[in-house]
Image (spheres, grey):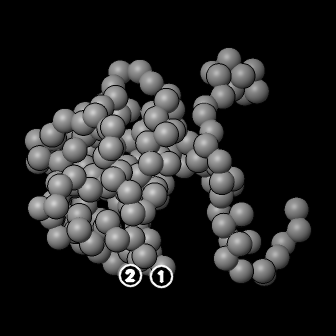
């Protein structure tokens, strides 16, 4: 490996992309109807109090609408919902077209067959350069018993390696 001090955005994206992440769709109920966006920068933050974090781009037109609503749901996508990651990443379209969902306890859309969902209330926002760092208080949550997560790695969708391969390598 050769060290570099090249910090141009393309190089940063390439290096940061070697960290595999899950994919989520953040959804909310707004006066204009349901809204949502794809987000890969989601993480648990604290168990006591129960907090999560994610970072929408400052250019997001959906995040300000969800922020104003004050509550939202993090839908963790299973491997079979790759199409939803793409659908909710697009701007200027009806992101909920053909998407089945039910209402969360806070009234936000829970995508059918989500791997897990977390109903949240906005706790804080912080400057994160070209992104906003959102901290949210967890109010309700649920998960499916079994499903593989949808991952993002080096700019592509990915999945988990079969357990037998991981065990053989260990």
Q: Is residue 37 left or right of residue 85?
A: left
Where does residue 132 sit, x and y in percent of width and height?
A: 38, 74
Q: Is residue 1 left or right of residue 51?
A: right
Q: Is residue 111 left or right of residue 89?
A: left
Where does residue 28 sit, x and y in percent of width and height?
A: 22, 54
Instruction: Give the residue at x 32% y 66%.
Output: 62
Provide the secondary structure element on which disc 1 rests: loop
Where does residue 25 sit, x and y in percent of width and height?
A: 37, 49
Instruction: Give the residue at x 66% y 67%.
Output: 13
Check if mark 1's residue and mark 2's residue have beta carbons within 8 Å. Answer: yes
The N terminus lies in quadrant: bottom right
Identify the mark at residue 69; answer none if there is no mark.
Answer: none
**Number of other residues with Cα within 10 Å of mark 2, as a class: few under 14, some 14 to 19, many 20 or more:** few
Residue matched to label 2: 127
Instruction: Give the residue at x 65% y 22%.
Output: 162
Q: Nearer the viewer, residue 167 or 30?
A: 30
């Amino acid at each position: 490996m050769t060290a570099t001090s090249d910090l141009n955005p393309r190089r940063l994206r390439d290096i940061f992309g070697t960290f595999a992440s899950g994919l989520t769709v953040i959804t909310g109920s707004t006066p204009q109807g349901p809204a949502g966006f794809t987000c890969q920068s989601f993480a648990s933050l604290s168990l006591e109090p129960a907090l999560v974090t994610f970072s929408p781009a400052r250019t997001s037109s959906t995040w300000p609408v969800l922020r104003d609503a004050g509550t939202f749901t993090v839908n963790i996508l299973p491997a079979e919902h790759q199409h939803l990651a793409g659908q909710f990443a697009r701007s200027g379209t009806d992101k909920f077209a053909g998407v089945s969902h039910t209402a969360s306890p806070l009234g936000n859309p829970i995508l059918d067959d989500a791997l897990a969902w977390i109903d949240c209330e906005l706790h804080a926002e912080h400057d994160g350069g070209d992104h906003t760092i959102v901290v949210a208080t967890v109010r309700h949550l649920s998960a499916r018993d079994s499903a593989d997560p949808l991952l993002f790695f080096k700019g592509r969708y990915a999945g988990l390696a079969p357990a037998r391969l991981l065990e053989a390598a260990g």
